[in-house]
Amino acid sequence: MKKTFKGLYLALIVFFLYLPIFTLMVLSFNEGKTMNAWVGFSLKWYEEMFNNRQIMEALGNTFTIAFWSATIATIVGTIACIGINAMGEKKKSIIMGLNNIPLLNADIVIGISLMLTFLMFGISLNYGTVLFSHITFCLPYVILSVMPKFKQLQNLTYEAALDLGATPVYAFFKVVLPDIMPGIISGFLLAFTMSVDDFVITHFTRGAGINTISTLIYSQVKVGIRPTLYALSTVIFVIVLVVLIAINIMSNKKKEKNI
């Protein structure tokens, strides 16, 4: 009875989580524009999506901004973690406390603050300001992901490499970097996801004509969302699903090899 209840509870959670996504996927193949009735199966919304320049530009902006902001934030965040790790416990706790403030702060506060900063220095809002803003708010997530790996490190192997004649840089790349790599990868993926998902900060720091998927959808809410966005959401969901499955298969194979 207990197992049945647990299974039913899990099924209900999965049902409510994925029912909206499944509904959206079904509507993306509906020939009609209405959500109230099924007119017939059609791929015309997918064709229209790939031929829509505005959607393709928004899609390109979303993923290029996410990739570069996650990459730069990961590099800067990892270097920052090296410096933080070398500090004393008191200074380290202060810096980590300051790092956690943006994580708890509302996105609208960060977005307006960045916008006012750009305008105060006479910087016109454009693609670059969005990229800089995404790097700024992704950085604390990277530090939060990488820093625990430094705490797990044992300096004995690093010191042994130095005693054997390795330079500090060589010892770092050969000894320290492999140990903290899981944290770096987690930080990059988290930063990439946060960037793709962001709307508020992008909305306040983008210039005219610069759209991401989230801002494009918001702009179309006023005039009515076309089913092409259902198709776009379906494509993104399928891509994410395929990537996750591929990552799980690769990690399982790696575990089997280690065993």
Image (cartoon, rainbow, N blue to C red):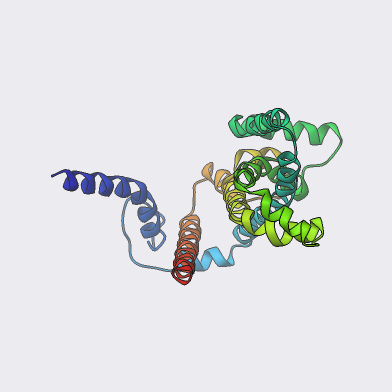
The x and y percentages for residue 10 are: 28, 47
Q: Report whether residue 144 is seen.
A: yes
Residue placed farthest to the right in the image? Answer: 122
Q: Is residue 52 above or below residue 111?
A: below
Q: Residue at x 56, y 67 (%)?
A: 50
| Viewer-side residue, 48 vs 110 | 110
| Viewer-side residue, 227 vs 124 | 124
Q: Residue at x 46, y 70 (%)?
A: 253
Residue placed farthest to the left in the image? Answer: 1
Total numbered labels: 0
Q: Is residue 141 above or below residue 121?
A: below
Q: To which quarter of the image does residue 37 belong?
A: bottom left
Which of the image's four quarters has the N terminus? top left
Which of the image's four quarters has the C terminus? bottom left
| Viewer-side residue, 197 vs 191 | 191
| Viewer-side residue, 29 vs 132 | 132
**Is 25 left, or right, of 161 in this rendering?**
left
Q: Report whether residue 64 is seen.
A: no
The x and y percentages for residue 100 are: 63, 32
The x and y percentages for residue 177 are: 68, 57
Q: Residue at x 47, y 72 (%)?
A: 257
